Image: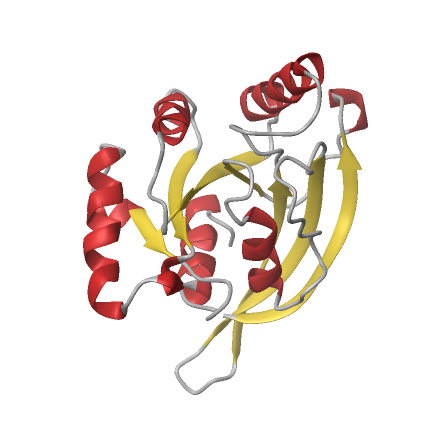
Amino acid sequence: MILLSAQFLASAETKKSWPEPGAPEVAFCGRSNVGKSSCLNALANQHGLARVSRTPGRTRLLNFFDFKISEKTRSGARGPTHELRLVDLPGYGYASGPKSEKAGWGSMIDTFLTERESLRALVILVDGDLGPQESDRAMVDFARTLPHQLIVVATKIDKHSKSRREGLLQKAASFLKLDRDQVLGFSSKEKLGVDELWHTLVKAVGTP
């Protein structure tokens, strides 16, 4: 894929403040500090498009980003162009802040995933180093009740040798009760899996 543009669009908390529907949307969710912002920055080939924090639970709003990409032909030329809107959701699991505030984030995520008409796919990021947790399995089970395409991305796999990565991905798929090809390996540090994820996103949303 050839990245043509990537830009921050808006932050939103309530349904009333969501941007008007535009390009097909993909939501990114995962446990706090799983690497959602780093994943988005790797897809954008930028360091600062999405804010990266060392403090878990700092993303408290829905953050919308518009992307334009082009497929690359065998000769390396530009092919069909696709527009997608990627949405960074607050992390689940550990998060800083009072319980009432965290409950509000949960409601905000639930409302977006169940009521956003332009949403086409949901990416659930799991920690490929630590391994998926029970909260990840619960999120995958919830995603199965939604009409959106489900994509699971295992982040931080660069922390393990190449010989171990396939076994880790297979173990993650088994824990989440998914087929192995439903879990993509990813490393924002090594830019591993970036092109594969882009192809998966384009296919999932069905852009022309």
Viewed as shown, does residue 195 lie left or right of 46? left
Quadrant assignment, res 55: top right
**Looking at the image, residue 75 lies above or below residue 112:** below
Viewer-side residue, 115 vs 168: 168
Residue 123 location, x and y as percent?
A: 46, 41
Residue 108 location, x and y as percent?
A: 65, 21
Quadrant assignment, res 109: top right
Residue 170 location, x and y as percent?
A: 20, 48
Residue beneath the point at 61% across and 68% down:
45
Residue beneath the point at 61% across and 39% down:
56
Residue beneath the point at 20% across and 67% down:
163
Viewer-side residue, 58 vs 68: 58
* Residue furthest to the top: 100
Q: How many marks?
A: 0
Q: How is the image coloured?
A: secondary structure
**Looking at the image, residue 78 lies above or below residue 100:** below
Residue 97 location, x and y as percent?
A: 70, 24
Viewed as shown, does residue 69 lie left or right of 198? right
* Residue furthest to the bottom: 75
Viewed as shown, does residue 91 lie left or right of 160? right
Quadrant assignment, res 67: bottom right
